[in-house]
Amino acid sequence: MTYEQIRRAITARMVAFTGIEQERIFYPNAQYPAQNQDGSGVFKPPADGLWCRLHIQHATAFMAGMADQPYTRKPGIIVVQCFARLRTGMRGLNELADALEAHFAYWTEGDLECIEASQVDAGEYEGFYQINVNIRFRAG
C-alpha cells in the first residue's frame, strides 16, 4: 500500500464514525470551516462540547519478505486527539474513546490492518482536557 492509500482508507473510516458529529472532527492539513476560524483565519475550537483531531503517524517501514521483489510493511499509529472544556468531567471523553476503539480496533481494509486501541491521558492544555486514542496499524 502507498502512504496515500493508507491516508485515504483511514480518513474514510473516520468519516464513517458516528460517535461524534463530523463537523467536530478536524482532519490533517484540511481547511477549517468558517465557524472554526477567527477573523484572521486562525483555528478556533467549537464553542462547546467535545471535538477531535485526526493524525496519522507513520513509523519506520521495514522489509518483510523477498519474492519476485521486496515486500515492505508500513506500521504506524492513528492518533485521535479528543478534547473537552476544562471542568466538564471525563465521562464524555471516555465514552468517545470507547466508541473510537469499537470503530477502529481490529478493522481491516485491503492490506491495512488496525490492531489494538489505547487511551492516553494528555491532561490540561489551553483551556481543554485532552485524551489521545492511539490505534496501532500495519499496512502491506
Image (cartoon, rainbow, N blue to C red):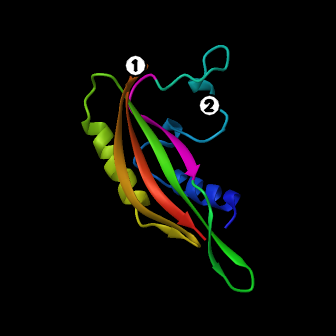
Q: Main secondary structure of the magenta part?
A: strand
Q: Is residue 128 left or right of residue 40?
A: left
Q: Residue, x 65% and y 13% (percent of image)?
A: 39
In this rendering, the answer to whether 77 lies above or below 83 is below
Q: Residue, x 57% and y 25% (percent of image)?
A: 36
The circle drawn on residue 3 is none
Q: Is residue 62 left or right of residue 2?
A: left
Describe the element under mark 1 as helix, strand or loop. Answer: loop
Q: Nearer the viewer, mark 2 or mark 1?
A: 1
Q: Residue, x 36% and y 58% (percent of image)?
A: 102
The quarter of the rendered structure image containing the C terminus is bottom right
Residue identifier under label 1 = 127
Q: Residue, x 50% and y 51% (percent of image)?
A: 78
Q: Position of residue 124 (x, y in %)?
A: 36, 25
Describe the element under mark 2 as helix, strand or loop. Answer: loop
Amino acid type indicated by mark 2 = Pro
Q: Position of residue 105 (x, y in %)?
A: 40, 61
Amino acid type indicated by mark 1 = Gly
Cα separation, mark 2 vs mark 1, equals 21 Å
How crowded is the residue under tag 2: few (<14 C-alpha within 10 Å), some, or many (20+)?
few
Q: Magenta part of the protein: which range?
A: 47-58
The circle drawn on residue 33 is 2
